[in-house]
Image: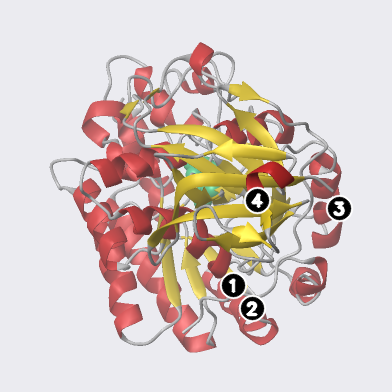
Amino acid sequence: MSTTLITGGTVVSSTGRSEADVLIDGEKILAVLAPGSTLLGHDLKSSVDTVLDAAGKYVVPGGIDAHTHMQMPFGGTEASDTFETGTRAAAWGGTTTIVDFAIQKYGERVMDALTAWHDKASGECAIDYGFHQIIGDVNDDSLKAMEGLIDEGISSYKLFMAYPGVFYSDDAQIFKAMRVGADTGLMTMMHAENGPAIDAMVAELLAQGKTDPYYHGVARAWQMEEEATHRAIMLANLTGAPLYVVHVSAKQAVAQLAAARNNGQNVFGETCPQYLYLSLEDQLGAPGFEGAKWVCSTPLRSKLEHHQDHMWQALRTNDLQMVSTDHCPFCMKGQKDMGVGDFSKIPNGIGGVEHRMNLIYQGVVDGKIPLERWVEITSTTPARMFGMYGRKGVIAPGADADVVIYNPEGHTSIGLEKTHHMNMDYSAWEGFEIDGHVDTVLSRGRVIVDDNQYLGSKTHGQYLRRAPSQYLI
Ligand code: URP
Ligand code: ZN
Ligand code: ZN
């Protein structure tokens, strides 16, 4: 077992910061020590195998992205990052754990789908990974199978109120699944948009000749998100199911979540970097077909209505608990361009797994959130929300040595295909400048990124069995 000492840095947690050295033994953190400490009379620097100098830098728990879709079959194609390329890109950006979605499609058995996802990911990941289970066909068989998910290390499942004919569940199906979720200790994750009404509005817009990507955002109006969020909250209230609403983008949906939480309900929400920085007007409304790059659901919202400011505010006030990416990349050529002349045929999704830690750190620099909140919403809360805390999301003795040395004096220019590592022929984040840099990344004690070099391997990442949520009220 090799030993590593990270020395001279500022260790930042969700609750504070201190000057400390971090001693790693093999895959685990052994101790967090006052700077320059000795252990049993030994000078640590000269007794460990590796010393990493973190002077002037932040030492933070590795990022946890709890919402990714590697090689997801969707929209008539497949998300362009494989588990190999997507987890490598994640590592570059300081994310050391992902929770991806195993998908039970209509007509499939849940456990068969889960096995298929294990086969896709096993031996292909640079970092540790877990799964949520998508239930795309709620029926007696899948409801029964849900009862076995905890034994598989899966403590959360996702339903869709959107995408009729694909993953959509009606209210009766949601009610039944939530009952099982409540009884078995599963977190219900919800894609909250009124799918049938959206489809009717899409048909209206297309009939009027409104075919540009911009109209994706018009069809998926905030009312569609608010209404579905409210309905999900009410069904969760009735069944006692803990509820986690994914990719929240509308300020009205946040208000629904906040009201339910104020009522004492176990209701939570995530937002994504795209809803903090990008807009209906500037990105979806870009000239010609360019806006297709930013077609995702829920959609980018109007900057005139200030949804983006509200998302930052909700992260400050804990009306939203965390930030995931909903990483679901598609290339422009051969994928997004399927929707030229019909926005409803553009595969939905944005890639960003590599940039989340940097983009949210920029929020610290810009005075939107405190430094500790950055750690909380990108690592500690995801760990607690999805049953990984103690092992992940914290720098403390006994935790996995997933650590990022982050340089606040560094700089990151997010750019084109050639400067990011995701398998995409464009970047949704082109032109973004970050006042910070991911210098070094350790995953279970192994340095996988250092000094702008990738040192990891696709066989390093392990499947992570998760416990029930540690975040419930
Ligand atoms: O546009 C999105 N969000 N694509 C991925 C699938 C989903 O709904 O999360
Ligand atoms: Zn979704
Ligand atoms: Zn998603």
Question: Could you say where residue 24 lies in the image, as x and y percent from the top left?
Answer: 69, 52
At horizontal 31% and vertical 39% (from top left) the residue drawn is 362
Disc 4 to disc 3, C-alpha distance: 48 Å
At horizontal 52% and vertical 87% (from top left) the residue drawn is 240
At horizontal 16% and vertical 47% (from top left) the residue drawn is 306
Disc 2 to disc 1, C-alpha distance: 6 Å
The residue that mark 1 highlights is: 187
The residue that mark 3 highlights is: 115
Give the mark nearer the N terminus: 3 vs 1: 3
Pointers 3 and 2 in contact (CB under 8 A)? no
Judged left or right of residue 398, residue 302 is left
Question: Could you say where residue 349 lies in the image, as x and y percent from the top left?
Answer: 50, 36
Q: Residues within 10 Å of mark 3 (few under 14, many from 20)?
A: few
Mark 2: which amino acid?
Gly
Residue 181, label in figure: 2
Instruction: Please identify, in this view, whether the residue under mark 4 or under mark 3 is nearer the observer.
Output: 4
Disc 3 to disc 2, C-alpha distance: 21 Å
Pointers 2 and 1 in contact (CB under 8 A)? yes
> Could you say whether the residue bearing mark 1 is in a helix, strand or loop?
strand
Residue 43, label in figure: 4
Which residue ends up furthest to the front in the rendered image?
41
Instruction: Please identify, in this view, whether the residue under mark 1 or under mark 4 is nearer the observer.
Output: 4
Q: Disc 3 beta carbon < 8 A from ligand 3?
A: no
Mark 1: which amino acid?
Met
Mark 3: which amino acid?
Thr
Q: Disc 4 beta carbon < 8 A from ligand 3?
A: no
Question: Could you say where residue 247 lies in the image, as x and y percent from the top left?
Answer: 43, 52
Q: In which quarter of the image is residue 410?
A: top left
Disc 4 to disc 2, C-alpha distance: 52 Å
Whether residue 78 can be seen here? no
Instruction: Name the foreground residue: 117 vs 433.
Output: 433
> Could you say whether the residue bearing mark 3 is in a helix, strand or loop?
helix
